[in-house]
Image: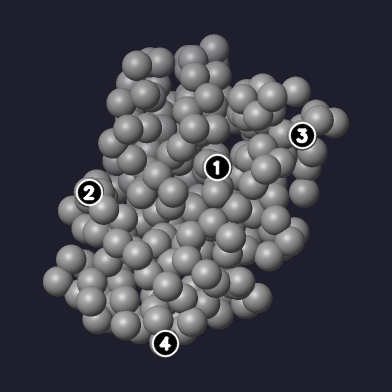
Amino acid sequence: MTQDEKKRAVAEAALEFVESGMVLGVGTGSTTNLFIDALASIRDRLDGAVSSSDASSERLQRVGVRLLSLNEVDRLSLYVDGADEANAQRHLIKGGGGALTREKIVAAASDRFVCIIDDSKRVERLGAFPLPVEVIPMARRQVAAAIQSLGGEPRLREGFITDNGNEILDIHGMQIADAPGLESSLDGVVGVVTNGLFARRPADLLLVGSEQGVERY
């Protein structure tokens, strides 16, 4: 089974958790794009969706799903999104696509977070994938110095601006033993909007596309 086939299988498996009348939270990325495409077959069952990025919003509209603002709903029953890395505790690194802040907001507003990945994203320890940190542009140098003091190597994501108008520093060279602790430390740095660790609010269920099919954790 190819990586694309694993992604498609896990994206389609997530449809099981979409219930009639639901307002759904939808993330960003290649696996999530396949989930959005799969939603086309059941779009009439949905009341609408809240998206974490402009790119996902455009794709949802193309398949006929009504878009809502998070400010129009009280809570979301379900959030479906991918990840760049996931460990056995369902702690995640997200933000390779640059939508980490909105993803974290939508995840926080959701009762259940189902994360969909292929098995290349499953790791024993987070950190091989560079950890994204969204920063206010004027604070980039100050934030980079704070990251270096934590043992990471920050690199500016060249030529990239988030949907919120900010920059991203990608942290290289960190083996993350305490994901919730590092998430809190980074969020405490003045000038940081948020970081790509989803550990204080991890995924509730991890669906993994593998050679054996779709595995659940």
Q: Position of residue 111 (x, y in %)?
A: 56, 51
Of badges 1 and 4, the one in the foreground is 4
Q: Amino acid at mark 2?
A: Gly
| Vertical placement of residue 188 versus 28, above or below | below
Residue labelled with disc 1: 82
The residues bearing labels 1 and 2 have C-alpha atoms spaced at a distance of 24 Å
- The scheme the figure's colours follow is one colour
Of badges 1 and 2, the one in the foreground is 2
Of badges 1 and 3, the one in the foreground is 3
Residue labelled with disc 4: 149
Residue labelled with disc 2: 159
The residues bearing labels 2 and 3 have C-alpha atoms spaced at a distance of 34 Å
Q: Residue at x 33, y 40 (%)?
A: 53
Who comes first in sequence, dot 4 or dot 3?
4
Q: Residue at x 52, y 70 (%)?
A: 173
Mark 1: secondary structure: loop
Q: Amino acid at mark 1?
A: Gly
The residues bearing labels 1 and 4 have C-alpha atoms spaced at a distance of 30 Å
The residues bearing labels 4 and 3 have C-alpha atoms spaced at a distance of 38 Å
Q: Nearer the viewer, residue 24 or 154?
A: 154
Who comes first in sequence, dot 1 or dot 4?
1
Residue labelled with disc 3: 210
Mark 2: secondary structure: loop
